[in-house]
Image (tube, rainbow, N blue to C red):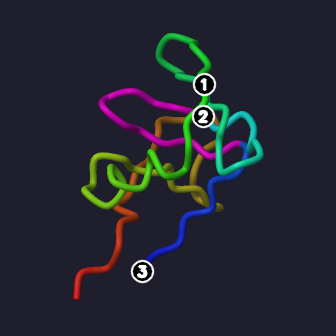
Amino acid sequence: MTRILLAQGVRYRRDGQVYLVREVLPGGRLRVRNQSFGAELIVSRDDLYAPWLSGELRFEVGGPKTAPGGPLILMWTGPESG
């Protein structure tokens, strides 16, 4: 199964909205900011697991050939099908 590190600065898209992890909180919670309209909310990692498995949640791809601040480049990061 693929591992995802939910750390500060990670961006993901869910339900057509882009979110940025602003802070990792105790108890498996995350403070995230909705990049579309600026609201901040607290989510649990467990709340993200089911949408990630179903493909409804996608994470930003980072690397040396991606442009910071550019468009959100997404990839399927769900569990490997076997």
In the rendered structure, which amino acid carries the disc numbered 1? Arg
Asked whether the beta carbons under mark 2 and mark 1 sit within 8 Å of each other, the answer is yes
Mark 2 to mark 3 CA distance (whole Å) = 24 Å
Return the residue found at the far front.
27
Considering only order in the chain, which callout, 1 or 2, is on the residue closer to the N terminus? 2
Secondary structure beneath disc 3? loop
Give the left or right position of residue 81, taking residue 50 as reference: left
Residue at image location 67% in from the left, 32% down from the top: 31
Pointer 2 residue: 20
Q: Quadrant of the N terminus?
A: bottom left
Considering only order in the chain, which callout, 3 or 1, is on the residue closer to the N terminus? 3
Secondary structure beneath disc 2? strand
Instruction: Locate residue 40, reporting x and y percent.
Output: 61, 19
Marks 2, 3: nearer the viewer: 3
Specify start and end residues of the magenta stretch as a single range: 9-19
Residue at image location 49% in from the left, 52% down from the top: 46
Q: Quadrant of residue 15?
A: top left
Residue 61 included in the magenta stretch of the image: no
Q: Quadrant of residue 50?
A: bottom left
Pointer 1 residue: 33
Pointer 3 residue: 1
Instruction: Locate residue 44, reporting x and y percent.
Output: 56, 43
- Residue 55 or residue 25, whichever sits in front: 25
Give the left or right position of residue 67, taking residue 24 as reference: left
In the rendered structure, which amino acid carries the disc numbered 3? Met
Asked whether the beta carbons under mark 1 and mark 3 sit within 8 Å of each other, the answer is no
Give the answer, above or below, for where 16 lies relative to 29.
above
Q: Which mark is residue 5?
A: none
Give the number of callouts.
Answer: 3
Return the residue found at the far bottom.
82
Mark 2 to mark 1 CA distance (whole Å) = 5 Å
